[in-house]
């Protein structure tokens, strides 16, 4: 059994270790114990996305939380960033989200937020792991008279929508604006359309009929093709695709072109610099960012710093350096003046706000960045040795890097949430990047697959 927490909570296949009802109960217990304070009646919020296994894990978490003398407040289906907001605004002691984000329906996960709406620091996650893996909680159970209760919160969605609407500038309006939303059959399926409608937009929604198994299936931020076609069909100003738990965004302009997360960062940072809200003139990005983003930021005379992949590392650097925007090419973008975590709907609102502030279509704003050709191949792996300890892999990476020189780069890393190795190559042409990417991926498959 080893480590429970990955780069984004605990994750795995539902009904298999560690995503079992028993483990969820213990995570509920340990989280409740960690956030209990003397002289205070504690409460923990629980939200989920639309996966079938959410019911099983939700009930197990409730049992664990109540068994430690803490109240559980169930808010139902709501985006991950919605739990972050509600946990803070309701002064709850912690918030838990049951979701595996962009993963297929059979996977699920548990993410935890502290009372201030931020994801847990490593030290707290390690303390929770220690309580669970070393069976320390049986001796910590309170007497029957001190058990917790469970409640359902009926107005959670409405509260979150009010918060979202306040991130759109009051001096502008979406009256008459046409937008298409792809809700990935996930947690945004009600919140996103209602938010944009209440802001005055004319909304067309696709993939907003979850059945527990269709979350992220050929839709959402990882599959924006249908959204692009719908934008053209509807003559919309923009299209926005969310992932299963609503913390990522991929945008589509009025011409049907798909914008990456890096392009969205460039567009928003450019407008923020103009209006004076780009604190310390700084953008935080990750090692997976396209070379085109750093080139664009240099042209705009905007500073940037690079972190490891993972929104927690982006956030840490933003807080340390005083940056107001940071994110990942995957569309996980944090606007720290608005929220404590990546929020796909907040990001969509900032994109359309940038269009209104500049009085320009999204295709025009997107010209601020040229995307360098990039190839990405995910290879399923059976083992995860340090890349530097596999001689054949080191050799092929070095060979490709020498061929590309200053006109490209190579990044090979393991996924933080799945058993796979990601091979990414950027270069001068799509043909060349794909050739080199396949060359490295073949070695990964041979040695680690």
Image (cartoon, helix red, strand yellow):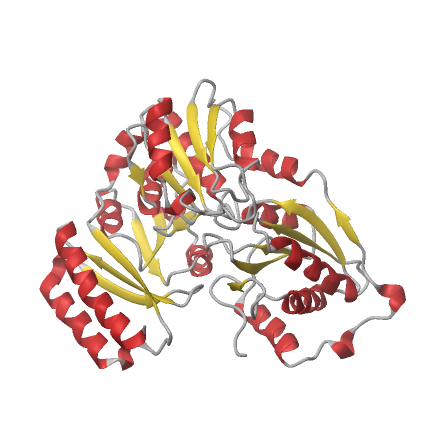
Q: Is residue 254 left or right of residue 409?
A: right
Q: Give the camera-side residue of 354 and 143.
A: 143
Q: Is residue 93 visible to the viewer in this orientation of the structure?
A: yes
Q: Work out which quarter of the rendered image holds the C terminus and state it.
A: bottom left
Q: Work out which quarter of the rendered image holds the N terminus and state it.
A: bottom right
Q: Position of residue 22 (x, y in %)?
A: 66, 69
Q: Give the camera-side residue of 340 and 223.
A: 223
Q: Quadrant of residue 352?
A: top left
Q: Is residue 387 visible to the viewer in this orientation of the structure?
A: no
Q: Is residue 376 above or below residue 196?
A: below
Q: Position of residue 296 (x, y in %)?
A: 24, 45
Q: Is residue 282 above or below residue 355?
A: below
Q: Is residue 153 left or right of residue 305?
A: right
Q: Position of residue 353 (x, y in %)?
A: 42, 30
Q: Quadrant of residue 54?
A: bottom right
Q: Position of residue 127 (x, y in %)?
A: 61, 74
Q: Residue at x 67, y 46 (%)?
A: 75
The residue furthest left is 403
Q: Is residue 275 left or right of residue 205?
A: left
Q: Give the camera-side residue of 250 and 81.
A: 250
Q: Is residue 315 above or below residue 170?
A: below
The residue furthest right is 145
Q: Residue at x 30, y 51 (%)?
A: 303
């Amino acid at each position: 059994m080893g480590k429970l927490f990955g780069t984004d909570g605990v994750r795995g296949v539902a009904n298999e270790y560690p995503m079992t009802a028993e483990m969820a109960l213990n995570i509920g217990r340990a989280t409740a114990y960690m956030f209990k304070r003397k002289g205070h009646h504690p409460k923990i919020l629980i939200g989920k996305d639309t996966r079938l296994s959410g019911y099983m894990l939700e009930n197990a978490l409730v049992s664990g939380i109540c068994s430690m003398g803490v109240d559980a407040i169930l808010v139902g289906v709501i985006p991950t960033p919605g739990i972050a907001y509600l946990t803070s605004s309701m002064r709850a002691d912690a918030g838990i989200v049951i979701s595996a984000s962009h993963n297929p329906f059979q996977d699920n996960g548990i993410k935890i937020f502290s009372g201030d709406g931020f994801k847990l620091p490593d030290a707290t996650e390690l303390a929770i792991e220690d309580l669970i893996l070393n069976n320390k909680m049986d001796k910590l159970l309170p007497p029957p008279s001190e058990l917790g209760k469970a409640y359902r919160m009926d107005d959670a969605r409405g509260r979150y929508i009010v918060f979202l609407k306040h991130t759109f500038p009051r001096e502008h309006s979406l009256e008459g604006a046409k937008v298409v939303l792809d809700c990935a059959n996930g947690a945004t399926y009600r919140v996103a359309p209602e938010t944009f409608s209440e802001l005055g937009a004319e909304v067309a929604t696709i993939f907003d009929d979850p059945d527990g198994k269709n979350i992220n299936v050929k839709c959402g931020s990882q599959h924006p093709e249908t959204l692009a076609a719908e934008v053209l069909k509807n003559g919309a100003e923009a299209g926005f695709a969310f992932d299963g738990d609503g913390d990522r965004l991929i945008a589509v302009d009025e011409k049907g072109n798909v914008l990456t997360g890096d392009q969205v960062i460039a567009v928003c940072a450019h407008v923020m610099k103009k209006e004076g809200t780009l604190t310390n003139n700084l953008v935080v990005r990750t090692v997976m960012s396209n070379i085109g983003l750093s080139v664009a930021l240099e042209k705009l005379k905007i500073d940037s710093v690079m972190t490891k992949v993972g929104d927690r590392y982006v956030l840490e650097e933003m807080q340390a350096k005083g940056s107001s925007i940071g994110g990942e090419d995957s569309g996980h973008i944090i606007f720290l003046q608005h929220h404590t975590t990546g929020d796909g709907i907040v990001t969509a609102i900032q994109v359309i706000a940038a269009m209104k502030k500049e009085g320009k279509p999204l295709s025009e704003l997107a010209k601020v960045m040229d995307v360098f050709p990039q190839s990405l191949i995910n290879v399923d792996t059976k083992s995860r040795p340090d890349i530097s300890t596999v001689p054949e892999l080191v050799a092929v990476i070095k060979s490709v890097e020498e061929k590309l020189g200053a006109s490209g780069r190579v990044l090979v890393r393991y996924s933080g949430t799945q058993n796979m190795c990601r091979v990414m190559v950027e270069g001068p042409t799509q043909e060349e990047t794909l050739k080199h990417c396949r060359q490295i991926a073949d070695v990964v498959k041979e040695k680690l697959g």
